[in-house]
Image (cartoon, rainbow, N blue to C red):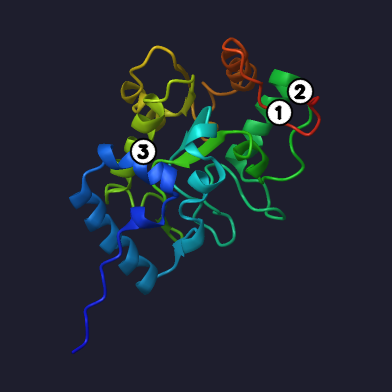
Amino acid sequence: MTVPAKPVYLLDFMPDDWREAVTPFVDAAVVAALSSFVVEQYRSTAVYPRKQDIFAAYRLCPLASTRVLILGQDPYIKPGQAHGLSFSVPPGVAVPPSLLNVYREMRDDLGVEPPPSGDLTAWSRQGVMLLNAVLTVRAGTPNSHKSQGWENVTDATIRALNAKAERVVFVLWGAAAKAKAPLVTNDRHVVLRAGHPSPMNPTGFLGSRPFSRINAALTATGTLPVRWSPAMPRH
């Protein structure tokens, strides 16, 4: 007799530290339904990012090391762009318009040249979690995996960070991200809000000075600042 395969449960693929931290805040039934949906989507159509990159933001930013969260919406929808980090693209991929505005603001804010590519992995390795509210998307269709259950997982991630004893700076760009602010309830943390960096949004982001404000919030508690650009001095 053939033994039925065990259903996929997405959190089983999350790093152990994060899985333990988010589990008290998730609805297991919602995650089970999400898991079935995601498996079927990858089976039947083109979905981004690659399966192995779904939890890249968690893998690159262990819970204990995470001190900044930059929240995006969902992965890029074009081939080769999404690799599991909000706003970031792999080396060699053209920098998307929103990230170009982020880099423009970095230059205006810090007076330094931005990274040479759109790969923000170096930020993640310094404890800057680049998380999308929805972690998968159907090719060519923005928001196609919205309201399927990912929000339950990523809201739980924000709650887990909110429970940390050390300061975390939550960076919320755009209306959808700013709507997550009520999840941050501990006054030890800092919430920075601004407009979305998309060129479609002409006001509210440029001039918000997020990078210097993040570093000021970190150094106020004795934490090293983030080295946002290779042009910045090492600390």
Q: Nearer the viewer, residue 36 or 134?
A: 36
The residue at the point 21 percent across, 44 percent down is: 27
How many residues crowd mark 1 within 10 Å: few (<14), some (14–19), many (20+)? some
In the picture, the quarter occupied by the N terminus is: bottom left
Q: Amino acid at mark 1?
A: Arg
Q: Amino acid at mark 3?
A: Ala
Q: Residue 4, located in which quarter of the rendered image?
A: bottom left
Query: Nearer the viewer's eye, disc 1 or disc 3?
Result: 3
Q: Nearer the viewer, residue 86 or 143?
A: 86
Residue 19 spot, x, y in % from top left: 37, 46
Residue 34 spot, x, y in % from top left: 27, 55
Compared across the picture, whether 64 is left or right of 120 comes to left
> Residues at badges 1 and 2 in contact (C-beta under 8 Å)?
yes
Q: Earlier in the sequence, mark 1 or mark 3?
A: 3
Residue lying at the far bottom in this picture: please name it: 1
Q: CA distance from mark 1 to mark 2?
A: 8 Å
Query: Nearer the viewer's eye, disc 1 or disc 2?
Result: 2
Checking the image for residue 21, the label placed there is: 3
**What residue would you read off at disc 1?**
227
Q: Earlier in the sequence, mark 3 or mark 2?
A: 3
Q: Dot 1: what SS?
A: loop
The residue at the point 57 percent across, 12 percent down is: 221
Residue 155 spot, x, y in % from top left: 33, 36
Query: Is 46 situated above or below 212?
Result: below
How many residues crowd mark 3 within 10 Å: few (<14), some (14–19), many (20+)? some
How many residues crowd mark 2 within 10 Å: few (<14), some (14–19), many (20+)? few
Residue 90 spot, x, y in % from top left: 65, 53
Checking the image for residue 235, the label placed there is: 2
